[in-house]
Image (spheres, rainbow, N blue to C red):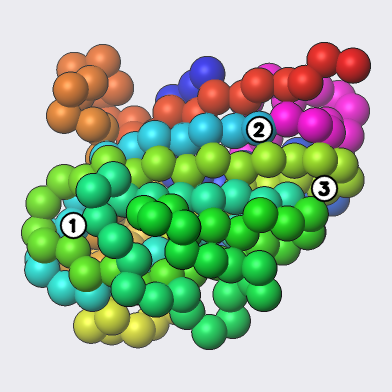
């Protein structure tokens, strides 16, 4: 378990740094190429204004993500060929080095619970969560616990401490859990 201000993980020994620079090792990283594990991430998402947002993930291997209680309106072009909307989940269930999947979702201003789950079978490993507002349609950026790098695209769209854990997190937004399969 750990607390992070951005979801930009990679396995340093696995040779897959994803699309965004500055990735950090998964929690419980070992000196080896780590295989056969999963990660679950929960975070609060601060939406500053009503609008349509494009949010997504990139992982090695598959992953799924949801904004609890909200429905995706579509999967965006360029998403992995196995991407589907499964209930509230935006999902790519595939053994792949790049599951890049993004969806469009209408959200009112406010706080939402974001959940993501990914699995790693073998080889490289990574997980990134990114987004943008359709008002700007600039490049995608990692969602972070500070708006400094995001203000020009998101006008403050950011991951924030969940209201129930605000005192404990002290400004760090996401919790990650690593569960390794024993062999």
Which residue carries the number 1 mark?
47
> In the image, 44: left or right of 1?
left
- The segment highlighted magenta reads 23-37
Of residue 68 and residue 5, the one placed in the foreground of this image is 68
Q: Position of residue 46 (x, y in %)?
A: 20, 50
Looking at the rendered structure, the secondary structure element under dot 1 is: strand
Q: Is residue 14 above or below residue 77?
A: above
The kind of secondary structure the magenta stretch mainly shows is loop
Say which residue appears at 46% left-offset and 75% top-offset: 75
Looking at the rendering, which quadrant does residue 94 occupy?
A: bottom right
Q: Nearer the viewer, mark 2 or mark 1?
A: 2
Q: Pointer 2: residues within 10 angstroms few (<14), some, or many (20+)?
A: some
| Residue 124 circle label | 3
Q: Position of residue 90 (x, y in %)?
A: 47, 59
- Which label's residue is closer to the chain start, 2 or 3? 2
Which residue carries the number 2 mark?
38
Looking at the rendered structure, the secondary structure element under dot 3 is: loop
Viewer can see residue 21: no
Q: Nearer the viewer, mark 2 or mark 3?
A: 2
Which quadrant, please, contains the C terminus?
top right
- Which label's residue is closer to the chain start, 3 or 1? 1
CA–CA distance in space, label 3 to label 1: 32 Å
């Amino acid at each position: 378990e750990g607390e992070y201000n951005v979801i930009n993980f990679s396995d340093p020994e696995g040779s897959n740094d994803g699309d965004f620079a500055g990735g950090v090792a998964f929690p419980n990283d070992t000196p080896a190429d780590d295989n056969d594990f999963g990660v679950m991430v929960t975070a609060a998402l601060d939406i500053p204004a009503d609008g349509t947002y494009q949010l997504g993930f990139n992982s090695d291997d598959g992953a799924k993500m949801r904004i609890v209680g909200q429905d995706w309106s579509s999967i965006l072009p360029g998403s992995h060929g196995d991407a589907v909307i499964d209930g509230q989940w935006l999902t790519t269930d595939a053994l792949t080095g790049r599951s890049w999947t993004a969806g469009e979702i209408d959200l009112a201003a406010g706080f939402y619970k974001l959940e993501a789950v990914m699995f790693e079978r073998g080889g490289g490993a990574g997980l990134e969560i990114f987004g943008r507002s359709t008002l700007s349609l600039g490049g995608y950026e990692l969602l972070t616990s500070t708006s400094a790098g995001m203000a020009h695209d998101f006008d403050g769209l950011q991951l924030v401490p969940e209201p129930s854990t605000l005192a404990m997190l002290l400004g760090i937004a996401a919790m990650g859990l690593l569960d390794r399969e024993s062999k």
